[in-house]
Amino acid sequence: MERAFLSVAVAALLGTFAAASTAFADETKALPDDAKLMGEQHSIAILSKPHPKRVYVLEPVFPHIVASKVWIIEGDKQELVGTLSGGYLSNFALAPDNSQLYLFDTYWSKGTRGTRSDFITFFDGQTLDIKADVDLPKGRFLVVPKKQNADITPDGRYLLSYNLAPSTSVSVVDTTERKYKGDLEIPGCGLIFPTAGNRLSTVCSDGTLLTVKWDAALKTTTHRDGPFFDAENDPVFEHAAFDKKKGRVHWVTYDGNIISADLSKDKPVIGKPWSLLSAEDKAEGWRPGGWQLITMHQPTNRIFVLMHKGPKWTHKQPGDEVWVFDGNTGKRLDRIHLKEHATSLAISQDAEPYLFTQTEKPSLVTYNVADGKEVGEMAFGISPFLLFTAGD
Amino acid sequence: MERAFLSVAVAALLGTFAAASTAFADETKALPDDAKLMGEQHSIAILSKPHPKRVYVLEPVFPHIVASKVWIIEGDKQELVGTLSGGYLSNFALAPDNSQLYLFDTYWSKGTRGTRSDFITFFDGQTLDIKADVDLPKGRFLVVPKKQNADITPDGRYLLSYNLAPSTSVSVVDTTERKYKGDLEIPGCGLIFPTAGNRLSTVCSDGTLLTVKWDAALKTTTHRDGPFFDAENDPVFEHAAFDKKKGRVHWVTYDGNIISADLSKDKPVIGKPWSLLSAEDKAEGWRPGGWQLITMHQPTNRIFVLMHKGPKWTHKQPGDEVWVFDGNTGKRLDRIHLKEHATSLAISQDAEPYLFTQTEKPSLVTYNVADGKEVGEMAFGISPFLLFTAGD
Amino acid sequence: MVMQVIDKLFERMSRRTAQKMSRRNFVATLGAALAGASMLPVLPVARKAQAAEDPGVEWAKRVGAQTTDPKACNYWRYCSSDGYLCSCCGGGPATCPPGSTPSPTSWVGSCLNPDDGKMYLIAYRDCCGKDSCAQCNCLGTAGEMPTYRPQLNNDIIWCFGGSSMVYHCSSAAIVGQV
Amino acid sequence: MVMQVIDKLFERMSRRTAQKMSRRNFVATLGAALAGASMLPVLPVARKAQAAEDPGVEWAKRVGAQTTDPKACNYWRYCSSDGYLCSCCGGGPATCPPGSTPSPTSWVGSCLNPDDGKMYLIAYRDCCGKDSCAQCNCLGTAGEMPTYRPQLNNDIIWCFGGSSMVYHCSSAAIVGQV
């Protein structure tokens, strides 16, 4: 009997799959006659509106780098609220109002082989539904992800994707038309700092700064500032404290010098370098280091840098402390002692900011900037690399 | 000067990429005039001929299951000698002479979305070069990998891939023609035990055994043996001790009963169940369990089973010991105490066999069957699941 | 429409079978089938609580089932769930994480709510279409059977009939009280 | 043919630049460029050992470079290598693992062989076309520069010009003695 029943059940069941491709099962039909129906509806979650303490964590998932991931975290609640599935060494960007999320991505039709495709995926910022895949016909720069290899203009109009294949250029995608518009040539330069709807600056291998302005037809006019750092001996890190809306940037060099610049006009104004380090700090061997090692609190122009003790060429060593500086005066305001050394950091852009740090464990450890106290720790992923906050 | 030099260098360098797509660089040209040329040639490794102590480890790579992997290990040397990259929940099979390796695979064109494709990839067993992708037009059964969901006939002629989508069938691919030939219907059954070039047996949900024979046109004749185990209360595990060349199988049930069968003829001969467990063993709570929990040494008909202490429904709990039985007499010959509990095991089919065990750490721990002593331990991967040895 | 026919069929089968089998045997069989089974398709079957015999009750006692933390493996609804909990991934016990889609096929279990001591019918629907959510891996094997009995096996990717066969996480909605 | 022209260009540039820069400065610059740089393209440049100043020598001392175990990060040839060692993945110091293909582009470093105390020119060619081999992750950052100086950056996937841009592992062949 049991056997007969189960055979029928299996047959019925298997028949179900083919037919049930659109309808939900109404399990209430299966209740006995005396059962009470509860009617709980199954649903799909939607994110609440973006807020300053939401953190987007980009993970290349080493060593399975064909399967990148984005983890969306409510940093005030230490809660995972969503993920995005990506491809090979994805880059990520947020619309200025966080209404859209973008993955700059590369796939092969057979995982690690077959036909390669490069495109930007548009996600709705709250449903996380995919709205479009916009081709990048020139491909993408394939590198362990760094923020300034892909970005969006401060008005949200253009997505910019750095490329090196082999010439160096920036692919431009119009977010309103959802269309690739062309490439901007930036020979010998890298990193994208967009500071207007039609302007970006980029750091060149000889230490100069190239500013490129484009028109609707992607015709460019360029301006080059002479070397503003020593590209041989003390290069600026790839990650900088950057406020694209104000056109303000603070670069930090391997040896701990800060170079601030005002990129809000067509011709940048680049300040004189100043050091993060006092004579005493230098004697103790302090040095900036990590991956995404510097960020800024835009409303107050405060700079946050991961610091460790080590010799030259330890520029990727995780930080044991975060040092806080006034970006206007260069004065050190605080030293936050990290519970666990960190490779990357980000900060919320609200009045009572939280500091988010990515550890090697890996985990995300959050601190309250006001008192340097830990707010919480969350573990996810294998190799998260980059942190993005709403409006940063 | 330096800057000028490096700019030129970069330009030259970048020009190189486009042009160098076929030729190797001759770095010796760069040597100073007084340098001694060493002439070491760069090469691509080729595996030595297959041997009994080579182990192929299939890893679905949880939780990044779109990027399966096979690790090829020289079990006598504790050495990784090669890998295969796979897709979503790949299955694996070896040609009987190990001259070819096969991945039964599923990909989506955009990683987790886009166009799905299912096919078997043929790899050369020594170069690991890809020789063919043969489509599986009916798809594949997607499940955490188990050996008997994909196999090859003992003569190496046909690859067999189980499917449930939604009806249950076996897709047949001809290895000589490199072509999908069609599907064998096996309603209500699963697991593939091929025992001849044109015959397989499969276990059915009601406890019967269906034996299917096919002709060149894939026309089938079937034979069904009545229930040989209690499918409600004491099912046979999916993994069995199987010698496809001799058509011999030992199934083990959740409660530790062995059912041996001779599948070498069109009508199987199924033996009476016997228990792995003495009254004392039962009193102590011993039970078989794990993933790939049973295997056999084919030349001597010895059975190896992972055992642990636990109640019913702990059938996936890793084993603390491997018990060794004479498959002819049911006599227990040995208990091998594992250094580290194991989820899967395999054995080399030579005269002085090694026992390979997959731990949850994860690591591969190897023992010498003769004395139960550890031969070595190797760590690789995140979630290796299945072990295959040459000729098993 | 098809689903309703199937449901009727199951309902009818359940009742008929329940009459022919001993009740205890029936509940044990189906209970075993449903408890610990995961990623299974729609198997809407009527069950009554049979305290001592019921795997759902047994599970609740063994794990100390609770009703306050849906991110823990011992949350009461998960008596028959296997896999990554949607509650830990941006969803909830009855909610798929943003951007993933519930499989149109589900399986059904019967779990004890420790607060009111009553049994509830739970519909387990996998959320599909994204890479594994990778958080809160809760794996049970009570009642779990080999794949040649697919409706009772928790290793199968049960995203049949949905937009994608890529498994993301497991959810659990209350359907009724039994 | 193209490669030979490029090689000649580099050779000429090297000599010219070496004459115009102080030798120490030149060696330091190139040495820094090459030591610790990984996944870089062909950068065939003549170098002589300059003991105290040379990052290759410095590296050899710091890590205790050895010549017996090519599966260890401190094997002498790896002074400028970053990534998974092909030697741990079925290849060797100058051999790609089975089924992977060497990138036609490579970069060059100069390493100290501690046995004979001499410097050797090493060609680093990535092996490509398979998912990361994931064993023996050896990461150095001595002399490593940001990506706006790509030829000195070790985060870039340097499989340019090969059959695939999927990075598998890093190898290191001896080209000559300097």
Image (cartoon, coloured by chain):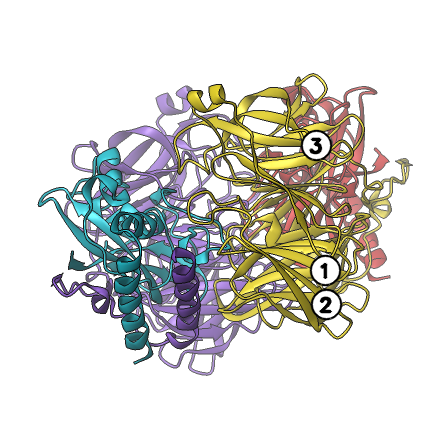
Chain colours: A yellow, B purple, C red, D cyan
The residue that appears at 73% across and 57% down in the rendered structure is A266
Q: Amino acid at mark 3?
A: Asn
Q: Amino acid at mark 2?
A: Trp
- Which chain letter matches label 1? A
Q: Which of the two discs, 1 and 2, labels the residue nearer the N terminus?
A: 1
- Identify the element where label 1 is drawn: strand
Q: Which mark is residue A214?
A: 2
Q: Which residue is mark 3?
A: A328
Q: Which of the two discs, 3 and 2, labels the residue nearer the N terminus?
A: 2
Left-right relation of D164 to D118 = right
- Identify the element where label 3 is drawn: loop
Quadrant of the rendered structure where residue C50 is? top right
The residue that appears at 41% across and 58% down in the rendered structure is D151
Mark-to-mark CA distance, 3 and 2 = 31 Å
Q: Amino acid at mark 1?
A: Arg
Left-right relation of C27 to D116 = right
Q: Which residue is mark 1?
A: A199
Image location of residue B266, percent across then percent down: 38, 67
Labels 3 and 2 touching (C-beta < 8 A): no
Image location of residue B210, percent across then percent down: 48, 61
